[in-house]
């Protein structure tokens, strides 16, 4: 795929639709996965290409490259003269105050050459907002009982056309401590991240024509009808304006704001009024095309995801080896076209894990000792060992009590005849909950593994916290974690797990549990697969508690039903999963490179259009 060198946006502004139609493959192919955290979270995507197209349309609009200029239009310089006259009359009538300190506020509207961010068509003019509008006006002489519209930030959208919602309130309730506005006023959010997300509005249909709302707004009231409000809004939402404003934000992290000085004196491109109206109409037309393009792309993505889901389901639904082979052959025939998205590749991975614990990933060997015999041996040996150690280790006594109360575990789905289902605690030497308090952290020392440090069966060292030796001894007094143990999360999120690597000393953080498999008969790597297969968390969630953050109780984790194969088959399953995960990683890397290429093509197209 190549960017067509025939793109002439800016030179041939009569056909801006070419921007979409001639490069539709680029806009629709640049799709990125949004970052998500934790098992069970749905993979979402960002239509990066279409998003950049929307931004480009706005940028072209305010640079005079979206519609052709008309020599018959009244020049913007004449328009500014009319605005100046109207403004002077308002000052004379004492409806607005005269702005003093022109040099400081740049209220004369003049823009120096070094301030102009780009070139304008001949009949356009640079000006400033405080020359063509009243900044942050107040509503005066309003009776307290008058009904008015209240607009909090949550009711202001990021839509390019500035739509908003409102609530009805008596004026007495909102006249103090809030930003004032009236029908026809234009407002932009000044606080992060609302400003960067282009939250802005043109206030319309306000009750009795007036309103008040969030204090995190800058408001402009145009003088008369010499400026098309929607055109000003397009500029406030254009990438260049947002980028410049973001650079000038002040304040502490999370509370940065765009200063009023930027809002009122930043250079604004002003076209002839007739052209402003044509630009707004053209933007409406092209944004509608973008909406249609977005809907078609999303429908295609969802259809593709459904197809992949149906085909992968045939694997887990297969009743025998022959049927499984046939269903896999059907998928393999179209492998390169099926697994081309983040969602489809992730679905393949989850299917592999599901097949692994269903006994459908590797063949069974009838000569191997069945898992039922294995489990009997495990129980006998473990019981003897726990009896020997119970006096010196209270945890051994606790395990004996819990194991004595166990009922038979039921299989969560059909499993091979040589397999056996067991409760998680029945496969362990120890299964211990963490010390459920926040540890006192130190700058360096022994790492403490919190729920945020486990993702996708691996430990994530980002944001690692540390504790002292003394804290470690106390926090781990029940059962010090050892290499080859598994750490499992009960909350925030539930169901993440990872194996402690050799040579490591780590401590359990809050909402985690230590799982020490009976290694002689249970592979910790197989158990890790069983603990992270897609439907285990689904089943476990049925017992999750909590009104806000769902979490599993210790007993729920202990009683998780785990399908157990013969020991040799456990190792074969782990080896096969490792083999298939290598393919998964290759698919992910291939997709990553493809997405990188699509983003580069999209950005190149945008740069060419603006150049």
Image: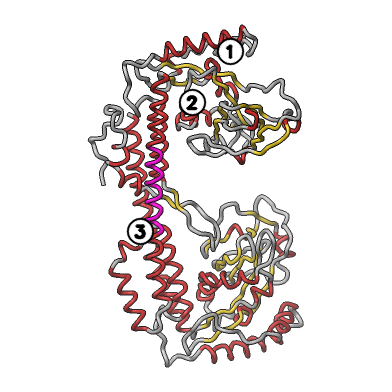
Q: How far apart are marks 1 and 3 (CA)?
A: 56 Å
Mark 1 is surrounded, within 10 Å at the Cα level, by few (under 14), some (14 to 19) or many (20 or more) other residues, namely few
Q: Is mark 2 on a helix, strand or loop?
A: helix
Write down the region rendered in magenta.
286-302
Q: Name the colour scheme.
A: secondary structure
List x then y, in percent, for residue 284.
41, 35
Q: Is residue 484 magenta?
A: no
> Where residue 179 sits: x, y (%)?
66, 28
Dot 3 falls on a residue whose secondary structure is loop
Q: Which residue is drawn at 73% across and 63% down?
A: 436
Q: Mark 1 points at which residue?
A: 104
- Which dot marks residue 72? none
- Whether residue 179 is visible: yes
Above or below: residue 297 compared with residue 270: below
Is residue 207 placed above or below 77 in the rendered structure? below
Mark 2 and mark 1: Cα distance apart in space? 23 Å
User: In the rendered image, which residue does mark 2 sit on?
Assistant: 232
Q: Which residue is drawn at 60% across and 20% down?
A: 135
Name the image quarter holding residue 211.
top right
Mark in the foreground, 2 or 1: 2
Q: In this view, does 60 lie above or below 392?
A: above
- Residue wearing tag 3: 340
Please state if 325 lies on the left or on the right of 194 as rendered: left
Q: Does the magenta stretch include residue 299?
A: yes
The reply to whether dot 2 and dot 1 touch (C-beta < 8 Å) is: no
């Amino acid at each position: 795929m190549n960017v067509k060198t025939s793109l002439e946006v800016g030179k041939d502004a009569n056909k801006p639709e070419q921007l979409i139609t001639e490069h539709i493959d680029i806009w629709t192919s640049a799709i990125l996965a949004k970052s998500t955290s934790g098992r069970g979270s749905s993979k979402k995507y960002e239509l990066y290409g279409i998003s950049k197209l929307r931004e480009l349309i706005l940028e072209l609009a305010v640079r005079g490259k979206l519609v052709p200029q008309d020599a018959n239009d009244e020049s913007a310089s004449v328009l500014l003269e009319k605005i100046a006259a109207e403004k002077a009359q308002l000052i004379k009538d004492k409806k607005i105050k005269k702005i003093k300190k022109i040099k400081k506020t740049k209220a004369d509207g003049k823009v120096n050459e070094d301030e102009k961010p780009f070139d304008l068509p001949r009949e356009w003019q640079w000006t400033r907002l405080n020359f063509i509008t009243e900044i942050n006006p107040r509503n005066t002489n309003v009776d307290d009982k008058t009904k008015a519209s209240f607009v909090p930030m949550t009711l202001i959208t990021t839509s390019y056309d500035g739509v908003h919602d409102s609530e009805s309130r008596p004026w007495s309730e909102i006249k103090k401590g809030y930003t004032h506005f009236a029908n026809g006023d234009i407002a932009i959010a000044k606080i992060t991240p609302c400003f960067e997300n282009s939250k802005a509005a043109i206030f319309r249909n306000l009750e009795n024509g007036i309103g008040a709302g969030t204090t995190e707004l800058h408001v402009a009231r145009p003088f008369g009808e010499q400026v098309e409000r929607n055109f000003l809004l397009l500029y406030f939402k254009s990438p260049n304006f947002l980028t410049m404003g973001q650079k000038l934000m002040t304040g502490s992290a999370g509370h940065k704001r765009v200063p009023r000085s930027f809002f009122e004196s930043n250079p604004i491109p002003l076209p002839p009024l007739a052209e402003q109206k044509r630009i707004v109409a053209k933007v409406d037309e092209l944004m509608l095309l973008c909406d249609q393009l977005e809907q078609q792309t999303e429908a295609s993505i969802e259809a593709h995801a459904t197809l992949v889901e149906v085909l992968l389901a045939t694997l887990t639904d297969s009743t025998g080896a022959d049927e499984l082979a046939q269903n896999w052959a059907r998928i393999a025939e179209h492998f390169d076209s099926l697994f081309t998205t983040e969602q489809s590749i992730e679905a393949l991975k989850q299917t592999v894990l599901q097949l692994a614990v269903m006994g459908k990933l590797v063949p069974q060997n009838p000569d191997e000792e069945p898992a039922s015999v294995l489990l009997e041996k495990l129980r006998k040996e473990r019981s003897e060992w726990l009896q020997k150690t119970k006096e010196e280790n209270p945890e051994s006594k606790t395990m004996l009590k819990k194991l004595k109360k166990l009922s038979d575990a039921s299989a969560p789905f059909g499993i091979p005849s040589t397999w056996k289902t067991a409760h998680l605690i029945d496969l362990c030497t120890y299964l211990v909950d963490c010390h459920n308090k926040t540890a006192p952290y130190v700058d360096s020392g022994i790492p403490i593994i919190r729920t945020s440090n486990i993702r996708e069966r691996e430990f994530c060292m980002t944001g690692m916290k540390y504790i002292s030796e003394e804290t470690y001894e106390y926090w781990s007094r029940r059962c010090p974690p050892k290499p080859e143990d598994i750490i499992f999360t009960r909350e925030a999120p539930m169901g993440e797990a990872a194996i402690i690597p050799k040579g490591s000393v780590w401590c359990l953080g809050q909402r985690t549990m230590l799982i020490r498999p009976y290694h002689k008969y249970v592979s910790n790597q197989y158990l890790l697969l069983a603990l992270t297969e897609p439907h285990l968390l689904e089943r476990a969630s049925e017992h999750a508690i909590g009104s806000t953050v769902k979490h599993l109780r210790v007993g729920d984790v202990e009683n998780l039903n785990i399908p157990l194969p013969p020991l040799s088959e456990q190792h074969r399953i782990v080896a096969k999963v490792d083999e298939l995960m290598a393919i998964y990683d290759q698919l992910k890397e291939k997709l990553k490179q493809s997405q990188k290429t699509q983003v580069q093509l999209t950005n190149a197209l945008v740069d060419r259009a603006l150049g």
